[in-house]
Image (spheres, grey):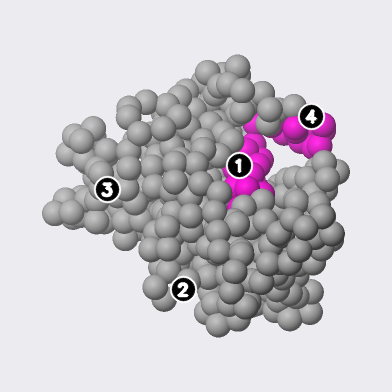
Amino acid sequence: MNTSRRGFLGGASTAAVLSASGVALAQKKYDDGASDTEIKIGHCCPYSGPASAYGVIGKLHQAFWKSVNEAGGINGRKVNFITLDDGYSPPKTVEVVRQLVEQEKVLLLYQTLGTPTNTAIHKYVNQKKIPHLYISTGASKWGDPKHFPWTMGFQPDYHTEGAIYAKHLLSTVKDAKIGVLMQNDDYGKDYWEGFKEGLGKEANRVVKHVTYEVTDPTVDSQVIQLKDSGATAFFNISTPKFAAQAIRKSADIGWKPTQYLNNVSASVAAVIKPAGYEASQGILTAAYLKDPTDKQWDNAPDMKTWRAWMDKNMAGANQADANYAFAYSVSSLMLETLKRCGDTLTRDNVMKQAAGYSKYVVPLALPGITINTSPTDYYPIQAVQLARFKGESWELFGDIMHAEST
């Protein structure tokens, strides 16, 4: 429901003004980063470094806001989208976000990417009361409006996703011996804790748990350790570069466990194709958006719209990369949120609108998955559907599973 005009009229702070025609108009209200002509949005992501596969997300954001401006902007205002490279390095993230907030004076931060990087700025942006919206990480900590009222995620949280994999594994893999590869940071630990919770009293089925650092060149030695442990099931908690390495190495050494791959590395173009289609058959993941490689969506109106938009605005981009679909979907939500702000472009109102969604459908969301938020619920998407890799694309199966089902 559009509540952007609620409370505009009446009271000293929102005094109605009369236009020349005598019609009552709401007074415009702005914070830094907004004016009659501009909305300034800050962003950072790894265009370089070990997680640079995610750089395409930032590239789509740039093209998206450019297309919005070409279509007339938001309520007549053009978006000034400022994006910086943080290399997936927390100290660099702190540096560039300070630049965006203190020098560029952006109205809000949007889609800053990575769990360790967002953790480094979490307290700072909340102390500064800067909207830190729809950030590109599913860590469960982003849904804590009581302690961090200015930070909100977008995608399903890692903890829930990990628990869903564990429950599915226990119900389908007989006498499972489980091996886990984990990126050694908050992102990896969030998935791991959820997975352990899902295993419950069966947690002792984990026979080997190995970690890697984002600065490591490969995870080959870790995969060999997992195979040598006798594991028959494998939970791959890694970012795209390392996820692809682990899938490929498993195949190279003849290890054929039941594999679960975290959603953040489920892109066919960025992970599966580099790992090899043959090596990837049967891998399981969780989805909440339509995958561009899944032909069942070819005639879906939102998929057609997205492909036409890509052809026009990002000609030559690999449409098999699910990161582009993700970036388009979340950008559409940010656009809707700013539209709902109307002429009250204050940071308080941006957060108010972000926390006011009910069953809102974003482009490319799987059927049955909607955006729902409130002042006490900062988890916009709390549902996923399992998928299995078959041929050259993901194949969905089972029912939509909600967070409460775990």
Given residues 266 and 222, the one toward you in this image is 266
| Residue under label 2 | 148
Location of mark 3 (residue): 404
Secondary structure under tag 3 reads helix
Q: Does dot 4 land on a helix, a strand or a loop?
A: helix
**Spot occupied by residue 351 in the image (x, y as percentages of width and height):** 55, 64
Few, some or many C-alpha atoms within 10 Å of disc 2 (few <14, some 14-19, many ≥20)?
some
Which labelled disc corresponds to residue 329? Answer: 1
Q: Residues within 10 Å of mark 3 (few under 14, many from 20)?
A: few
Cα distance, mark 2 to mark 1? 24 Å
Q: Residue furthest left?
A: 201
Q: Position of residue 306 (x, y in %)?
A: 68, 31
Badge 1 or badge 3: first in the primary sequence = 1
Q: CB under 8 Å between callouts 1 and 3? A: no
Instruction: Tell me the residue at 44%/41% (across/down).
Output: 359
In the rendering, which numbered label is found on residue 311?
4
